[in-house]
Image (cartoon, rainbow, N blue to C red):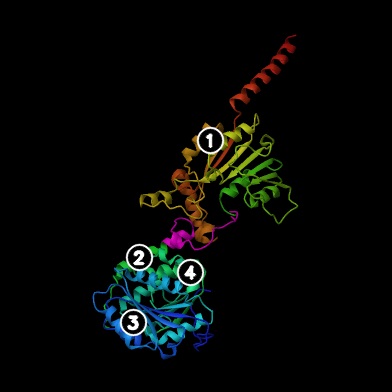
């Protein structure tokens, strides 16, 4: 559960049996403070299983040399001192330390700053939840007691900025953290290994990106209070740039979560193997169900888990589903037949001409050769004229256009740029494909974005749906999230010629009989 925890319920007793802890000190131009930070590490941690790693990020002073001196004069604590070949930045330095902790089989890594801003004396209390395996990350928060932060010397503008950014991030991510911007962090290395932290920024908002990854991965975060200290250390952070970077990262993560953007660093969950129906609001599923005619024989090509087939069967349709895998439905008494078949194969395993309606919902964009598929489908229906209900994503959607304008064309896990899509369509290109393949287009509609699925079925989602629907009336090519087409297969020339010859022979016989 994400949010704020206190020391209540956490054992303060440090028992490192079977646990290896790395105290990782990031240092840059910290020659005057590094030895003080190391000296303040509590004696209770000077024991087997605890090591210290100092990484000097190519400082321009004697940080590295002072670290080596401390290492030589303090044998009671195992200390490793490293120096980067070139400056990696705050985030880049953390990546090295976390990779070191994972590769050397540490169980916990605790981040300290070499400038002394965060109290090493709090390490035992912060370690407790991780040692008890009650959290995957522990953050030292200066904002659990907000007035203490100001009393500790935090400048008013930083205090206000911290509060505003944290409130915004909690709102965007659905969390209740008291602070996103403390650099006092402890992580389970097992948890770190589950997220792509190496894809994160080299800059200071690395801390924000790693929190977002933990949140999206649904890992457990605990917060414990720490004192605030602002001394004469040099601040290397540009406040306005940092705030902007935090805003961008958080917004991008939220857009990724609702599948309007994609960034691999925020892709921390396994791909979804099932897709729920979008019911209760205008969508490809509600429009398709409305178009279904009771008593009709329907072929649901690319039926997936069979959820739509069940809805059609409940409506009184005779449904045959076709997909690569046969779904296991909870309602076995429904009159549905399922056929295991790869739609990229050229032939069909059923007599397609026996169906009154053929549903191709969000399928054509997944096919390797959609034009050939539609040709084969038309040929298979022979002289019949079944109705085809087809939906697909609209690549011309305004959000996709804006992303392209900004230089982004990111395939993702879901949405218009789903990574499994092999073809992309606009209203015009889809219409051309159908007409050239021999289909008469009966109806074309624009489908709004599925806001209730993205942000929940609430007032805001309903308002956005209504607004999107109004905008679609103004320009469906620009504002429709998906394309809905109802078309009719026209017989091929060969079939039409056969129909013409046989029909003419019958008509001639009737005319001659009348004359006689």
Inter-mark Cα distance, 4 to 2:
25 Å
Q: Which residue is mark 4?
A: 193
Inter-mark Cα distance, 3 to 4:
27 Å
Q: Nearer the viewer, residue 62 or 274?
A: 62
Q: Are marks 4 and 2 in contact (CB under 8 Å)?
A: no
Frontmost of labels 3 and 1 is 3
Region rendered in magenta: 252-278
Inter-mark Cα distance, 3 to 2:
22 Å
Q: Position of residue 347 (x, y in %)?
A: 63, 37
Callout 1: SS: helix
Q: Which residue is mark 3?
A: 117
Identify the image quadrant of residue 388: top right
Categorize mark 2 by other alpha carbons within 10 Å: few (<14), some (14-19), many (20+). Answer: some
Numbered circles on residues, count: 4
Q: Position of residue 204 (x, y in %)?
A: 34, 70
Categorize mark 4 by other alpha carbons within 10 Å: few (<14), some (14-19), many (20+). Answer: few
Residue ID at (49%, 58%): 258
Q: Nearer the viewer, residue 142 or 85?
A: 85
Q: Which residue is mark 2?
A: 245
**Chief SS of the magenta region:** loop
Q: Which residue is mark 1?
A: 434
Q: Tag 1 or tag 3, which sits nearer the N-term? A: 3
Q: Tag 4 or tag 3, which sits nearer the N-term? A: 3
- Residue 265 is inside the magenta segment: yes
Query: Which residue reaches farthest top?
Result: 516
Does 22 sit left or right of 454 as displayed?
left
Callout 2: SS: helix
């Amino acid at each position: 559960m994400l949010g704020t925890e206190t020391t209540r319920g956490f054992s303060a007793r440090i028992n490192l049996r079977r646990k290896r802890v790395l105290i990782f000190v990031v240092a840059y131009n910290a020659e005057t403070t590094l030895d003080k930070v190391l000296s303040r590490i509590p004696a209770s941690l000077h024991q087997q299983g605890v090591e210290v790693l100092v990484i000097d990020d190519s400082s321009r002073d004697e940080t590295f040399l002072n670290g080596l001196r401390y290492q030589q004069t303090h044998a009671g604590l195992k200390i490793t001192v490293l120096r980067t070949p070139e400056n990696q930045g705050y985030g880049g330095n953390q990546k090295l330390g976390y990779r070191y902790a994972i590769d050397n089989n540490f169980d916990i890594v605790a981040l300290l700053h070499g400038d002394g801003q965060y109290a090493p004396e709090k390490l035992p209390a912060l370690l407790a939840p991780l040692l008890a395996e009650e959290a995957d990350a522990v953050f030292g928060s200066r904002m659990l007691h907000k007035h203490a932060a100001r009393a500790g010397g935090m400048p008013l503008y930083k205090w206000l900025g911290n509060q505003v950014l944290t409130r915004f991030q909690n709102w965007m991510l659905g969390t209740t953290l008291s602070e996103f911007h403390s650099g006092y962090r402890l992580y389970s290395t097992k948890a770190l290994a589950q997220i792509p932290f190496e894809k994160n920024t080299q800059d200071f908002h690395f801390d924000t990106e790693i929190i977002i990854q933990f949140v999206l991965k649904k890992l457990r975060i605990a917060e414990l209070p720490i004192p605030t200290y602002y001394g004469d250390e040099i601040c290397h952070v540009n406040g306005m740039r940092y705030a902007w970077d935090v805003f961008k990262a958080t917004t991008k993560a939220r857009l990724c979560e609702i599948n309007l953007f994609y960034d691999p660093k925020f892709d921390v969950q396994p791909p979804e193997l099932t897709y729920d129906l979008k019911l209760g609001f205008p969508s490809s599923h509600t429009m398709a169900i409305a178009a279904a005619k009771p008593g009709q024989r329907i072929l649901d090509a690319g039926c997936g888990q069979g959820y739509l087939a069940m809805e059609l069967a409940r409506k009184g349709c005779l449904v045959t589903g076709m997909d690569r895998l046969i779904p296991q439905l909870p309602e076995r008494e429904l009159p549905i037949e399922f056929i295991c078949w790869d739609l990229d194969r050229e032939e069909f395993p059923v007599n397609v001409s026996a169906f009154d309606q053929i549903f191709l919902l969000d399928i054509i964009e997944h096919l390797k050769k959609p034009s050939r598929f539609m040709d084969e489908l038309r040929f298979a229906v022979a002289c019949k004229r079944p109705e085809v209900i087809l939906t697909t994503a609209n690549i011309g959607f305004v959000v996709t256009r804006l992303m392209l304008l900004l230089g982004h064309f990111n395939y993702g896990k879901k949405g218009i740029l789903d990574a499994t899509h092999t073809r992309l369509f606009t209203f015009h290109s889809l219409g051309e494909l159908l007409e050239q393949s021999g289909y008469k287009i009966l109806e074309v509609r624009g489908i709004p974005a599925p806001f209730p699925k993205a942000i929940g079925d609430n007032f805001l989602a309903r308002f956005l749906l209504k607004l999107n629907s109004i905008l679609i009336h103004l320009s469906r090519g620009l504002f429709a999230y998906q394309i809905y087409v109802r078309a009719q297969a026209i017989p091929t020339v060969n079939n039409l010629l056969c129909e013409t010859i046989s029909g003419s022979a019958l008509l001639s016989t009737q005319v001659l009989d009348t004359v006689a």
